[in-house]
Image (spheres, rainbow, N blue to C red):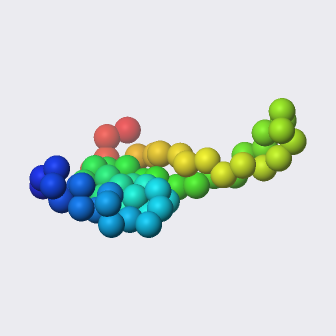
Amino acid sequence: ITTLYEISKIISSANDLNKILIFTSETIQESVMIEIFSIMIYNKESKRFEIEKAVGLKENTKKEKNPVR
């Protein structure tokens, strides 16, 4: 995505907000070193389980030869 026009086309062609959110989170994950995932929490006030989005840093998958400790 490079222009506001492209963003506008995606938003107007999406049938629902969920598709936009999924696309946005996938795009963000590709461009920065983060992971977006869902977690289930228990809301004591409503006495229900709820799904929330969480963001975390991607772990470095490359092994360092001489890690500093």
Q: Residue at x 32, y 52 (%)?
A: 28
Q: Report whether 59 appears left or right of 37.
A: left
Image quarter hosting the N terminus:
bottom left
Q: x, y (%) of residue 18?
A: 49, 59
- Image quarter of residue 45: top right
The number of callouts visible is 0
Relative to 50, say whether 44 is above or below.
above
Judge by depth and name the residue closer to the eye, 14 or 2.
Answer: 14
Inspect this view and state whether residue 54 appears: yes
The picture quadrant where one finds residue 14 is: bottom left
Which residue is situated farthest in the right direction here? 47
Q: Quick one: which residue is furthest to the top in this view?
A: 45
Residue appearing at x 24%, y 55% in the figure: 8
Which of 58/21 is in front?
21
Q: Residue 62, can we see it? A: no
Where is residue 35 drawn, in percent x and y? Answer: 42, 53
Q: Is residue 4 above or below residue 63?
A: above
Residue 38: percent from the left, percent from the top? 58, 55
Q: For this rendering, which residue is in front, 40 or 23?
A: 23
At horizontal 47% and vertical 62% (from top left) the residue drawn is: 16
At a point 66% along the width and 52% down the height, the residue shown is 51
Of all residues shown, which one is farthest toward the left?
2
Q: Position of residue 7 (x, y in %)?
A: 23, 55
Classify residue 6 as left or right of residue 33: left
Above or below, comparing residue 1 to residue 34 in the picture: below
* Above or below, 34 relative to 22: above
- In this image, 24 relative to 46: left or right? left
